[in-house]
Amino acid sequence: MRLLALYSLAALRPERRHTILISPALVPLARMLFADRFDIHTEGGPGVAYTHLGLRHTLGAVVSGRRFVYPFYWLMREQRRQSTFRDRLNDTAIRIASLSGRIVLPSRGNSNTYQGFMELQALSAFRTVAVRDFDAQAKRDFAAIGSRLRVQFGNSRADGVLVFPSGTAHQVLPPRWAAEQLPDACFAFHERDGYAGRFSEQGLRVERFHTPEEMLTLGRDARRVLVTDSFPSHVWQLMGERIVVLLSQQPRIRVVHPGFPDEQIVASRAPCCPCRNRDRGNHSLCDAGREYCRTWTEVDYIKDVERLLR
């Protein structure tokens, strides 16, 4: 999302060419899609770093002069069910530290916008970009970026269904649900994702990928590609009409590109959506006490999935 947002923001604020540092595994695809508007590298000293870590883990670096963006601060605040004394103490410390300019927070009013925009809008270069202007530019860019992907990873429209069911939190697709609703589909996982074993135990067909290019090649001949809210989702959304996005813990406006068609999204029916982002490791439960999101049990949700698979 951050790369997609930067691509559109760079068009709206072309006065300065930016450089972003990313994982080496993402560089070939990122340069193919975005290098005309910003530079992409893997090494160097960033002027500002994005982090999901809190103040306790970054304080030493902040004191030494490094700058960080806490992109999820307001989201976590708004999705917090209750505030403890420790929470309030941490909030106060972060707000005080932010006065130094070494901790940067997004604007609170943008917490319910496309997450890539919300995260990058924290930077001074993009502070004045209005949401409506970003959305309009992002929609213009959507088709152009997607066409570059389709040239290299176009498909022959076979009959198969490919599913990317994983994610870091409770947006994951339940293995038993997959066996009941999509028994003939192929389920794709990153090679280091241990969640794949739970699908194999259900007798489902599992494929592995390492790079984004391998991930896209897996879907070259699929009639439909289903994605949960995860890294694969943000790449596959660009491929357009044969993609179906299955949402659970987050609303469309935060995690789906503004250019992606609404009619190809199955929105969450969970009454507690949006929910707090919690690691799904070790069979942890969400705040409602569930291992998997309630939305997967909703009849209308299942009917929408069936409709989009026809």
Image: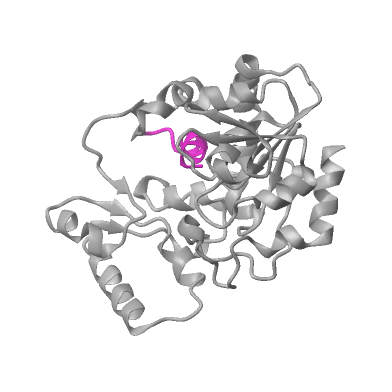
Location of residue 277 in the rendering, given as x and y in whole percent from the top left corner: 50, 61
Q: Residue at x 66, y 25 (%)?
A: 219
Q: How is the image coloured?
A: one colour
Identify the main secondary structure in magenta: helix
Residue at 29 percent of width and 68 percent of height:
94
| Side (left or right) of 216 relative to 7 | right
What residue do we see at 74% from left, 63% from top? 269
Looking at this view, is 104 or 24 the one in front?
24
Q: Would residue 296 be counted in the magenta stretch?
A: no
Question: At which x and y percent is residue 82?
Answer: 47, 81
Across the whole image, how many numbered discs are drawn on residues?
Answer: 0
Q: Is residue 78 above or below residue 187?
A: below
Residue 15: image location, x then y, percent: 38, 34
**In the picture, residue 42 is in which quadrant?**
top left
Q: Residue furthest left?
A: 64
| Image position of 88 with respect to 48: above or below | below
**Residue at left 14%, top 52%?**
65
Q: Answer yes or no: is residue 257 visible.
A: no
Q: Is residue 296 left or right of residue 116?
A: right
Q: Is residue 161 left or right of residue 85?
A: right
- Locate the C terminus and report the quarter of the image it occupies: top right
Q: Magenta part of the protein: which range? A: 1-17
- Residue 78: horizontal and vertical position, in percent? 50, 71
Question: In this orientation, does residue 3 appear?
Answer: yes
Q: Nearer the viewer, residue 192 or 104?
A: 192
